[in-house]
Amino acid sequence: MNEYERLSRQAEQYKKQYPPGTRIELIEMEDPLAPVPSGTRGTVKVVDDIGQLHMHWDNGRSLAVVPGEDSFRKLTPEEVEAENQSVSETEDADHGMTMEM
């Protein structure tokens, strides 16, 4: 198997493991110029044909994650649910209405 075939197979595995919408947390990024800070969470937009996870980070960044170079973990369903509840509660508080008479 040549390098292209190996990367292609690996990319297909990542596409199944991290479909669009998957939430991850960055542990460490090896980008020496402008890494995303450790502990940042984000949502997978797409996995490209060489296996990079293109992200929408919660801090507004969009730098891709490179499996094998960068360290990250997939959030558990419980963690995602807790995030969703927190966002929902914040939105409810922001949209609260006060009436004065």
Image: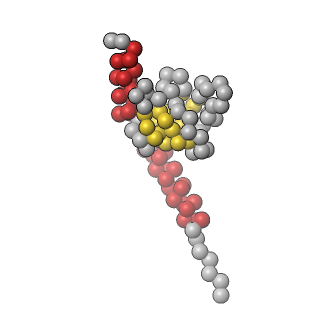
Residue 45 visible, this orientation = yes
94 left or right, relative to 83:
right
41 left or right, relative to 21:
right
Front position in the image: 65 or 84: 65
Extreme residue toward the top, this view? 1
Q: Position of residue 49 (x, y in %)?
A: 40, 28
Q: Where is residue 77 in the image (x, y as percent from the top left)?
A: 43, 44
101 left or right, relative to 56:
right
Q: In this view, does 77 lie above or below 84?
A: above
Residue 87 is drawn in which quadrant?
bottom right
Q: Is residue 67 above or below residue 23?
A: above
Q: Where is residue 62 in the image (x, y as percent from the top left)?
A: 56, 39
Tell me what residue is drawn at x 49 percent, y 22 percent.
68
Tell me what residue is drawn at x 61 percent, y 44 percent.
59
Residue 34 is drawn in which quadrant?
top right
Residue 3 is drawn in which quadrant?
top left
Tell me what residue is drawn at x 51 percent, y 50 percent.
83
Quarter of the image with the N terminus in it? top left
Tell me what residue is drawn at x 49 percent, y 42 percent.
43
